Image (cartoon, rainbow, N blue to C red):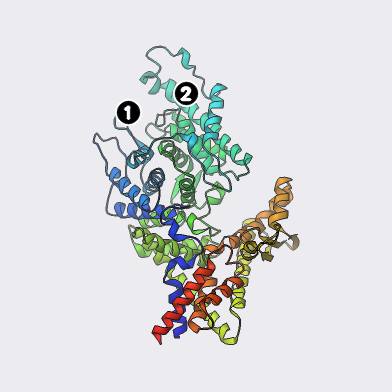
Amino acid sequence: MNKEIIAAVMASTIDMDNMSSDRLEALTKGHGMLNIAAICSANVIAEEVLRGVNLQLTDENIGELPIDDLLRKSIEAAENAGADAANAALLSATLCYFAGSNAQAGVPAGNRKLGAMARMIAGVDRCGVLAIPTPKANNRISGYAAVKAVYDEVFNNSLTPIDGSILPLGVGGGPLYGHNALGEDIGFSQLAINGAKAGTKGMLQAFANVGMPPSPIIAAILGVAAILEIVHPDSEVAEEYGEFFVANSAYVAGLGACEVAGLPEKLHIRGTGEEYDTANLVGDLGVLMKDIGGPSVVGMIAFEEMLSAFEESLDIGAGFSGGPLQPPLGHMTADAILALKVLLSTNGDIDQAAEKIKEIKTNFWLEPEIAKIATNTIARKSEQVRRGPVTRAMILATEGALTKETLRIAEFTQEKITEGMDLSDITKALDDEKLNNVCKAASSLFSGMMDKDIKIMITKYAGRSRRKENPFLDNYAGFDTNVDVEIEIEGEKIVMEKLANEIIPDAVVNKKQDVLEVLPLASVPVTELQLCGHTIVNVIVPAAVAGAMGVDESEVIAKKATKGAYITSSIPGGIERARDVAKRAANIMKDLN
């Protein structure tokens, strides 16, 4: 390998902040997203569980359990990465749950609940479900929608046949009600299932009515949380729902919520295949959520992204970071769950875990190599805050892809510069290749999903579609995107010109069902391109090669590299990163020579 390639590869990869237009340093202190906080907490939890710490909640007659100390360490790690106390509690409790903790245990004296324990250890107040926001999906709502829907049914007197005003002395509030037929078979069971249905329905309607795509899983969890603020959250229930000490009111509420939300009966973790009963999961997370305190929107985004570790994430409305699209790096929280789960399933074998993570990335993403590089970048950045087995496994799984892709682009760039090709034309060629690869991958994905021969081609992709002339919009195609798409379904061609700013708003506002049905075929690959500022190897590697070869000043190199990369330069940030790698490469060449 020649010195110019060595210098370019080294300059491109040595500082992970240059790999992305996303503001990675800001993420280390929780500005905008909390995935680094989640990954750091996952490192702590993996270390503790692998050395034998017991995660289980019990009703032992002692002041603290081992999980109290684990939660304390996890919360501290999340806070060190910028999470506030309430968000740190949410992340830590959720990660502990997925690592194997139970959501609740105990009798009145000795009762423990995972969310409440995390909240108290973090030192935050409880706020109630009505104040918990949903994750942002363009807009956001709050658990108020579930609480209101539940109380609407309370005042309609439709949740339970029991009239509390006629309960005799000695019945209401005591074990004759709570531990016998009136409470367990009638009161708790019907209140839980009917209330969860009402709360979930209210959430789904509220999502839609503010222009958000409803998230079935978030609606169900908050629907359960809302009714569990009323019904006894760990009561026994009628035997039709399960055996004594097996089924409880949280599970029954989960059943009702899942029915209304249309969730599948089982969910499966990517890579390990571990199966979760959905009603149990929703019930448990509802218990956790009702007690957790006051997480913010970014905390809830991280929470939802953890749920995208399930294979069924698209069906249940659980974030983006489980594929097939590669989201901005701040969304990448599913990796915390995936790496944690794989590590625990292999008893801490880093090599086995890395192979499994690599397999997951290969099988579930439109651009597997880019997804691996994105994982590598966020794992390396997380290690600046907190190292551990989770990040080690993520890095080991993806460093090969980073090296391979960087080398490929470097060799291509050197060859073309030697032939006399301008740098902006080189980065344009790389982005043309990217566009074609995404279109082919999306065509294959949808052909398989729909069992039809589907071909998708993005025929135009540029910035500024409907707004007046603006240098920012002209240079960054992720905003006001001017995009045309052609789709062939079994040979029948559909042309969508001005997709973003004419076709989509017309179809949505005027409810054109025939267009809405076909829009995902266009919107999925376009979105993949709009978000690709997360990984800018098509900009920085050519810039590094040009710097190593001394073709121009670093400022000129940076501007040419970003100008040609009309897709990768979807958001600002590329110029300064290209400038930096070009300078680094030139300096490395001086030392090599």
With respect to residue 28, does 226 lie above or below?
above
Tally the numbered discs.
2
Task: Say what amino acid the circle numbered 1 marks.
Answer: Pro
Q: Are marks 1 and 2 in contact (CB under 8 Å)?
A: no
Residue 404 seen anywhere in this rendered image of the structure:
no
Residue 59: percent from left, percent from top: 29, 35
Q: Earlier in the sequence, mark 1 or mark 2?
A: 1
Task: Say what amino acid the circle numbered 2 marks.
Answer: Ile
Q: Quadrant of the C terminus?
A: bottom left
Along the viewing direction, whichever of 414 and 220 lies nearer the viewer: 414
Mark 2 closeness class: few <14, some 14–19, many ≥20 residues within 10 Å = some
Residue 25: percent from left, percent from top: 43, 60
Along the viewing direction, whichever of 480 and 370 lies nearer the viewer: 480
Residue 587 seen anywhere in this rendered image of the structure:
yes
Looking at the image, is mark 1 or mark 2 nearer the viewer?
1
Q: Where does label 1 land, which residue?
A: 108
* Image side of residue 342 versus residue 132, left or right: left
Along the viewing direction, whichever of 476 and 328 lies nearer the viewer: 476
Residue 330: percent from left, percent from top: 48, 56
Along the viewing direction, whichever of 64 and 297 lies nearer the viewer: 297
Mark carried by residue 510: none
Q: Secondary structure at mark 1?
A: loop
Mark 1 closeness class: few <14, some 14–19, many ≥20 residues within 10 Å = few
* Image side of residue 263 versus residue 178, left or right: right
Q: Where does label 2 land, which residue?
A: 186
